[in-house]
Image: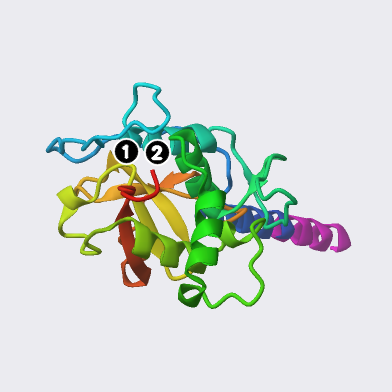
Amino acid sequence: MKQKRIFKIIAAGIVIAAIAVLIYNRFSYKETSTKRPRYAYKKKIEQIKSGIDKDGDGVDDQSDILESALEYIQTKPKYESRYYIGGTPNDGYGVCTDVVAAALFGAGYNLQKLVSEDIHEHPQNYDIQSPDENIDYRRVRNLQVYFKNNTKSLTTDLSEIEEWQGGDIVIFKKHIGIVSDRRDKNGVPYIIHHGSKYQRAYEQKYLKSKADEIVGHYRWELESKN
């Protein structure tokens, strides 16, 4: 009888462990894949191109931003918020703002420098008591101010799917990412982002579930700072 009881306890433990694994796999988001999602929308939406090629590599800015964001996530950065002297993470770790900084840097723009300059030129817009070039450009609230005042503002209405283009920047209340050129079956684009250490993939369906948190949608069209 005692052996049967022990066997039942072990069996119950195995069942509980199996259920726990299933729940974990269902609701967690492990950073294990950079495989791109398929283009599921039946209608092909033409990808816009910028009239500027800042770094002179033969790729326009809009396309360069998109491609650079994709190149960055191929490195599979681990999610962790750290402070870096010099400002730029180079140790395999990063946060959501680093996706955007890397995307713009790949197109020839130094977001760290641009944000720092804007903070010093227009401190009243940022409400920062002690500016710190190392970290200011890695804060979502600062980027919201910068993009709102320096780039082209676009719709936040997801029904206007053609207005959402790969390489655009989307900002949520506490998060930021790059719009992908991949779309779901309804034409809503995926988002290239990095928001959690438990994230399963870096290019995900995200806009619809966070539609009420979108605070800005921007396109990198600088006039005075390019």
Return the x and y of residue 53 as percentages of the image width and height. Answer: 34, 31
Task: Answer left or right for 206 relative to 165.
Answer: right
- Badge 2 element: helix
Return the x and y of residue 223 as percentages of the image width and height. Answer: 31, 49
- Examine the structure image and report whether residue 24 is included in the region drawn in magenta: no
Q: Residues within 10 Å of mark 2 (few under 14, many from 20)?
A: many
Residue 86, compared with residue 140, is above or below; it is: above
User: How is the protein colored in the picture?
Assistant: rainbow
Q: Name the mark on residue 62.
A: 1
Q: Residue at x 58, y 44 (%)?
A: 31
Q: Residue at x 21, y 36 (%)?
A: 47
List the residue tagged with mark 2: 65
Q: Amino acid under label 2?
A: Ile
Point out the residue furthest to the left here: 43
Span highlighted in magenta in the image: 1-12
Viewer can see residue 140: no
Point out the residue furthest to the top here: 58
Q: Nearer the viewer, residue 47 or 197?
A: 47
